[in-house]
């Protein structure tokens, strides 16, 4: 696809909604970075720079399709339609958070939206996605699962077990590999001996593609094809989206393993800027619309921070709730 | 009306429970290595493939994380999977799905979901399995909040507890003692026969001493108790049946009566099931104890292959009998 092309069958409204979503994720994460001192947790992982992957991928599925996420899950949560007030409150550890302050940044989940959870264990999403897609297949629901994971997870055994099983059973899964070039401080060049991680797909008899993860339209169209294929019973696909994490690994990261030049180089390939230029060139938006969207986005974020701050701390008396469905029974005979 | 029962082996009781629950609820399915065509390493699932077909009786490659990923993921979206891990020893390669996913999902996602998965695990010695096919890992899982840990010792309990496990809305790890697979017992044929978790079973009543045992050690304790009865020593043999939740009340009530406690457990001694039972009795029932608590365990050693060496380390009826006599 020509880099200036946009899908001809999309309404301006849909094209703009993609832009809004990416911008919402960007501004949300930048606000988190700015407010690190207030949030306090050193283990908050931001998605800045990778927005096109989550937004492009989630635009390619239906509302009732599923996603599994990673420790860097805010972007997936927002892209799947999660509410940012409850997301922000969760990151603040409040009762009004989507997980009532029990999970935090690494465990944000909204099961009502079929967003099945961020996950603190690298590579644990894909095996869970097997079960979700298996359930969909057994119940003949035709729902597809996108399982997001990173270049770090690409070398976990669990992922390889999952790709193999998904292939032999033709499960409706799309393996979305977000290659952001680093697993914390370890570069992908160090950690793997191949250039394109999508090559791994061949070993499991599935198709694999490596694409520009900063081009939201390319992400959308590639994933859409894989989703349609999976929905028709064709089985899984592996799609490697090459992108870059702008911030450190997480809020506590000293980030001393990447050069300023490298970071600046990637910032020139900002997924939101690239898309914005396309929309302008195709006369979908202009400066006035852009300004309005930016203002609305910032207001929305501001409101979410207010919501989070106003939300109550979880009551200490509830700390033992929800370990089991019902408190465990210690009755005798 | 008398309860209709049939005499069968432990493994057949488990099979019956699974079969009945699969008939009752379409969301129940079973997944694991060699469980379909072959019928399972210990033939627990024999005949289920023919009856329910390959969609619901799913043979997998040797990929334990993928097996449990299938089971836990499916449970998170409303199925009731049963996963078989062929030997407890293989749990080491798939702890992730149990400990960090199944056990945590309800809590860390703020109570949004149930995780109704049953993980079946044959365990224990007696088949010359040596160091990597004989272990008793049940105490590890008592340390993980969010899991329920079940360990029946004979046929009736296998059926009733398996049915409860499948109907549970929390993840259950179901330890199946290999020797107990082959013990026969009367099993109720009622399709709604279930046994609630957290209810210990008293096999014998007695005033002299309380013996708490799990898995194969229940049978050894029952044999010992029968012999001791001939010498007018009356033991109360209690099988907790579920380790989480633990029926502390039945155990403490018994010790209140007998004043003496021996715990028999096939796991290695350090940080074992017996250690936990001894600890809560010391905390909550110290005032009842007239003698020190004694734990009879396998020592902290890998399980040897040679049968005479294995026999040397695994607690048995004779050892229990002698220990009781010494204590009394």
Image (cartoon, coloured by chain):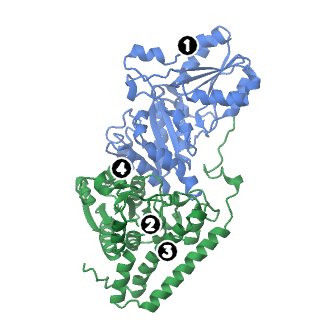
Chain colours: A green, B blue
Q: Which-is-in-front pick, marks 4 and 2?
A: 2
For the residues beneath circles 4 and 3, the answer to whether they share a chain is yes
Have a look at marks 4 and 2 and say if they share a chain: yes
Residue behind mark 2: A47
Q: Chain of mark 4?
A: A
Between A201 and B254, the residue placed more toward the observer is A201
C-alpha gap between disc 3 and disc 2: 10 Å
* Callout in the foreground (2, 1): 2
- What separation in Å lies between label 4 and label 3 (alpha carbons)? 32 Å
Q: Are the numbered discs 1 and 3 placed on the same chain, yes or no? A: no
Question: What separation in Å lies between label 4 and label 1 (alpha carbons)?
Answer: 46 Å
| Chain letter belonging to callout 2 | A
Question: Depth check: A16 or B196 in front?
Answer: A16
Which disc, if any, is residue A27?
3
- Mark sitting earlier along the chain (4/2): 2
Give the letter of the chain under mark 3: A
For label 4, count other residues whose C-alpha is less than 10 Å away and answer few (under 14), some (14-19) or many (20+). Answer: few
Q: Which mark is residue A156?
A: 4
Single out the mark in the foreground, 1 or 3.
3
Residue at mark 1: B319
Q: Residue at x 70, y 57 (%)?
A: A315
């Amino acid at each position: 696809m020509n880099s200036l092309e946009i899908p001809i069958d999309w309404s301006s409204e849909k094209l703009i909604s993609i832009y809004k979503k990416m911008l919402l994720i960007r501004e949300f994460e930048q606000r988190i970075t700015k407010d690190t001192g207030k949030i306090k947790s050193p283990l908050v992982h931001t998605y800045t720079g990778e927005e096109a992957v989550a937004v492009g991928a989630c635009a390619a599925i239906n509302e009732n399709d599923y996603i599994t996420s990673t420790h860097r899950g805010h972007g997936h949560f927002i892209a799947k339609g999660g509410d940012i007030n409850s997301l922000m409150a969760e990151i603040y550890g409040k009762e009004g958070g989507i997980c009532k302050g029990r999970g935090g940044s690494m465990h944000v989940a909204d099961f009502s939206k079929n967003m099945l959870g961020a996950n603190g264990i690298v590579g644990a999403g894909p095996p869970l996605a097997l079960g979700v897609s298996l359930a969909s297949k057994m119940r003949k629901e035709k729902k597809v699962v996108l399982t997001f994971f990173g270049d770090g997870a690409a070398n976990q055994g669990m992922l390889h077990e999952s790709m193999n099983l998904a292939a032999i059973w033709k499960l409706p899964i799309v393996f979305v590999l977000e290659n952001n070039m680093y697993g914390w401080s370890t570069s992908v060049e160090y950690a793997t001996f191949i250039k394109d991680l999508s090559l791994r797909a061949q070993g499991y008899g599935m198709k694999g593609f490596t694409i520009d993860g900063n081009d939201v339209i390319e992400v959308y169209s590639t994933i859409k094809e894989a989703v349609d294929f999976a929905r028709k019973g064709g089985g899984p696909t592996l799609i490697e989206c090459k992108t870059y994490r702008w911030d450190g690994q997480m809020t506590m990261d000293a980030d001393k393993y990447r050069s300023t030049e490298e970071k600046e180089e990637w910032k020139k390939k900002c997924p939101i800027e690239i898309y914005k230029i396309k929309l302008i060139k195709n006369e979908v938006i202009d400066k006035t619309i852009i300004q309005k969207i930016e203002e609305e986005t910032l207001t929305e974020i501001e409101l979410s921070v207010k919501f989070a701050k106003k939300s109550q701390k979880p009551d200490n008396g509830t700390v033992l709730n929800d370990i089991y469905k019902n408190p465990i029974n210690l009755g005798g005979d | 009306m008398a309860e209709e029962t049939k005499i069968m082996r432990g493994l057949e009781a488990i099979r019956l429970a699974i079969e009945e629950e699969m008939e009752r609820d379409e969301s129940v399915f079973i997944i694991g290595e060699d469980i379909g065509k072959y019928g399972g390493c210990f033939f627990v699932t024999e005949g289920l493939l023919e009856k329910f077909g390959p969609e619901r009786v799913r043979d997998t490659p040797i990929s334990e994380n993928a097996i449990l990923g299938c089971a836990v993921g499916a449970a998170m979206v409303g199925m009731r999977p049963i996963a078989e891990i062929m030997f407890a020893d293989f749990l080491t390669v798939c702890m992730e799905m149990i400990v960090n996913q199944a056990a945590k999902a309800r809590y860390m996602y703020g109570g949004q979901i149930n995780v109704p998965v049953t993980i079946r695990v044959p365990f224990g010695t007696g088949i010359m399995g040596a160091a990597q096919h004989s272990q008793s890992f049940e105490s590890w899982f008592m340390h993980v909040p969010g899991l329920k840990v079940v360990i029946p010792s004979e046929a009736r309990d296998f059926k009733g507890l398996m049915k409860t496990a499948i109907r549970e809305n929390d993840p259950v790890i179901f330890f199946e003692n290999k020797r107990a697979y082959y013990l026969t017992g009367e099993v109720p044929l009622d399709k709604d026969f279930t046994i609630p978790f957290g209810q210990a079973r008293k096999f014998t009543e007695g005033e002299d001493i309380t013996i708490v045992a799990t898995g194969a050690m229940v049978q050894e304790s029952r044999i010992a108790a029968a012999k001791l009865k001939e010498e007018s020593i009356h033991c109360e043999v209690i099988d907790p049946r579920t380790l989480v939740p633990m029926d502390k009340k039945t155990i403490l009530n018994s010790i209140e009566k007998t004043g003496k406690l021996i715990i028999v457990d096939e796991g290695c001694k350090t940080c074992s099931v017996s250690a936990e039972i001894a600890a809560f009795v010391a905390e909550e029932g110290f005032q009842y104890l007239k003698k020190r608590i004694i734990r009879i365990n396998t020592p902290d050693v890998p399980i040897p292959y040679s049968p005479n060496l294995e026999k040397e380390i695994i607690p048995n009826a004779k050892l229990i009998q002698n220990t009781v006599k010494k204590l009394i």
